Image: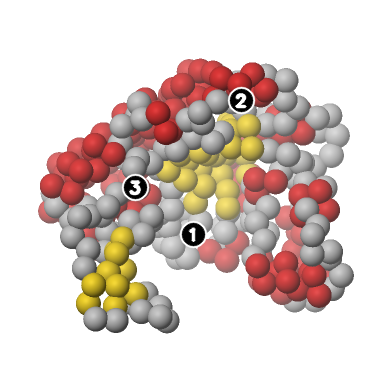
Amino acid sequence: MTPRERFLAVTRFETPDRLPLPTLFQCFGRETIKRWERDGLPKDAHLAAHFGFDRMELLPIHAGPLPHFEREELEEIEEWRLGLDREFRRKIVNELDAVEEEFPIRSRQDWTTMQRLLNAASPARYPRFWDDYTRCLRERDYPVGVCVNGPLSVLREWLGLCQLTALLVQDWAFIEEMIEYYTEFIILAMTRAVTDVDVDFAVIREEMAYKTASLLNSHTMRTRLIAAYESICELFHDHGVRTIFVESNGQLDGLLDLWVESGMNGAYLLEAGAGVDALNLRRRYGRALVLIGNLDHHAFCKAKRDIADEVRTKVP
């Protein structure tokens, strides 16, 4: 099987020739790599080739504000410098560390600026040689996908958690306006990608849960966000994308039901440290949900026996 055939077989609950190990889901910390090098890993080793990972790629599309959000009023205060980084965090920095951050949307005026940056037709959203790139993809033997941020994750980035939770109570109309605008932007920005390329999967990043609970309860989620999820999933389904993953960490109780209802049929990271149990999820959802992850990274800091027990428990 090719990497693409192998990945599609797993996501469709068929029988692959072996377990796929896609590069997209393999992340290693710098300290981990240094430790491996001390144990003998060549410093110029290509990790994907060294470990035999299967090729997998995301289409190189910029689905965020363009150009990056900036405020005009930046100031210098003695030895401190005040500025806004590319993740929208406003920082006062000295030689040692950043001590303060602010978020890009603090008022309706800031939202008006952000709307101008969410121009789906911006020429910088797609690679300059997009047509040549898509021609190469027609003969590929590996899976490719698209990735977008979910509406709640975006609102957290734009507003910050404190302001977001306050607006959910005080000014729902403003929140709804931003969700609707962002959802329409994503649909317009991604339509070209899923039209020009036979996409194998999609990822919706939605960081909305902590170790013991989610940011929103099920009722709030259902009434205020599910319409946005359904619209984004409908775009993917209409263009033949059969597998839509939601990427989220933390405790997912009460969230997976709504994500599945909205059209998503895959999930990762499935954080074991937050009490997520893939075996229980498989019994609960059957083949309605493709599962990725759930190995407890704490076990890998222990003895070889603990590592073996963790893997064999999840993947006998």
- Give the numbered dot on residue 68: 3
Helix, strand or loop for disc 3? loop
Name the residue at 51% across, 43% down: 246
* Image depth: mark 2 or mark 1 in front: 2
Q: Residues within 10 Å of mark 3 (few under 14, many from 20)?
A: few
Q: CA distance from mark 2 to mark 1?
A: 36 Å
Q: CA distance from mark 1 to mark 3?
A: 29 Å
Horizontally, residue 85 falls left or right of residue 18, namely left
Horizontally, residue 20 falls left or right of residue 110, namely right
Q: Which residue is mark 1?
A: 250
Is the C-beta separation of discs 2 and 3 under 8 Å?
Answer: no
Name the residue at 55% across, 62% down: 275
Q: Residues within 10 Å of mark 2 (few under 14, many from 20)?
A: few
Is the C-beta separation of discs 1 and 3 under 8 Å?
Answer: no
* 61 up-or-down from 268: above or below: above
Image location of residue 145, percent across then percent down: 58, 33
* 97 up-or-down from 56: above or below: below
Q: CA distance from mark 2 to mark 3?
A: 25 Å
Helix, strand or loop for disc 2? helix
* Image depth: mark 1 or mark 3 in front: 3
Specify the amino acid type for callout 1: Gly
Which corner quadrant holds the N terminus? Answer: top right
Horizontally, residue 5 falls left or right of residue 189, namely right
Image location of residue 109, percent across then percent down: 13, 47
Specify the amino acid type for callout 2: Tyr
Q: Residues within 10 Å of mark 1 (few under 14, many from 20)?
A: many
